[in-house]
């Protein structure tokens, strides 16, 4: 009981900070200068070693990712967020059999350049994949905006914004992200894997979700495409 009380206090503290930051979320994220972005473009397209594929071979040159196989979109994400994830991969704080060795080959300056490049790209429109039912999307919308008091699920919009555009480097943009990728990460958190050093909050949230709710949330945020949610 003591652990639950402390966890709940910590969660509400995070939400309070998130709400405060959300008040300035309309500010454009800082992006590197043109030479840095040009360097990031070269690394993203050509790589730094013939032994490893370039970033664009998986995430594509326009940063759209590959929604059909769950490779995330990077275009338009916050530069600080991308750089932080690359650092986690490089240092072992986050592990992936593909990303970890690639990120470890990059210097901190190169990681920042790649992050600035992808952050500078416009968000591409995702191709229509298998369409989720209207009922599933509506269920995902309710969970995202309102949470579920019966299970203790807090609303995703508290941290990711009501339009899913994220809050600076505090939380990533989810709008228009691959549904397969979002579901994959929620399942990963639900399994108890924190994913990265900041993942304990998401692990707690994912523990409240059923499999059908994960599918609904993933379908909803994928459908947003950076648009308004349609609710006040």
Image (cartoon, grey):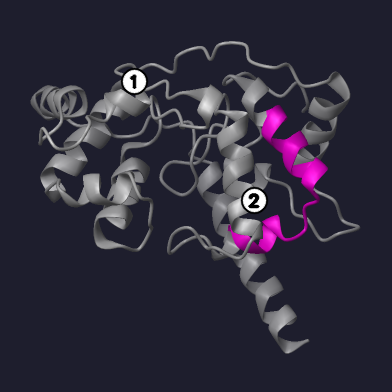
The mark found on residue 60 in the picture is 1
- The residue range painted magenta reads 202-220
According to the image, label 2 marks what residue?
A: 187
Q: Please rate how many residues cluster around mark 1, counting C-alpha atoms within 10 Å: few if below 14, some from 14 to 19, many from 20.
A: some
Give percent across and percent down for residue 31. 26, 31
Residue 232 horizontal side relative to residue 22, left or right: right
Residue at (66% x, 34% y) in the render: 162
| Residue 15 visible somewhere in the drawing | no
Name the quadrant of the N terminus.
bottom right
* Residue 24 colored in magenta in the image: no
Give the x, y percent position of residue 182: 59, 38
Quarter of the rendering occupied by the C terminus: top right
Residue lying farthest to the right in this orientation: 150
Q: Nearer the viewer, residue 5 or 69?
A: 69
Determine whether label 1 and label 2 are within 8 Å by CB. no
Q: Position of residue 134 (x, y in %)?
A: 84, 20
Above or below for 150 versus 57: below
């Amino acid at each position: 009981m003591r652990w639950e009380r402390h966890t709940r206090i910590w969660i509400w503290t995070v939400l309070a900070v998130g709400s405060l930051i959300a008040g300035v979320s309309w500010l454009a994220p800082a992006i590197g200068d043109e030479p840095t972005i040009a360097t990031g473009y070269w690394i993203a397209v050509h790589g730094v070693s013939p032994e490893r594929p370039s970033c664009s071979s998986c995430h594509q040159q326009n940063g759209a990712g590959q929604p059909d196989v769950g490779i995330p979109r990077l275009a338009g994400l916050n530069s600080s967020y991308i750089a932080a994830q690359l650092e986690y991969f490089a240092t072992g704080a986050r592990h992936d059999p593909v990303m970890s060795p690639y990120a470890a080959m990059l210097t901190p300056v190169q990681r920042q350049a790649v992050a600035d490049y992808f952050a500078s790209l416009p968000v591409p429109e995702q191709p229509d994949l298998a369409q989720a039912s209207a009922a599933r999307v509506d269920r995902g919308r309710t969970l995202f905006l309102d949470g579920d008091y019966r299970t203790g699920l807090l609303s995703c919009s508290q941290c990711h914004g009501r339009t899913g555009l994220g809050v600076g480097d505090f939380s990533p943009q989810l709008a228009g992200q691959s549904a397969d990728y979002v579901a994959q990460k929620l399942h990963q958190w639900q399994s108890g894997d924190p994913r990265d050093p900041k993942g304990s909050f998401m692990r707690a949230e994912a523990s409240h979700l059923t499999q059908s709710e994960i599918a609904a949330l993933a379908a909803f945020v994928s459908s947003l495409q950076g648009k308004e949610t349609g609710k006040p």
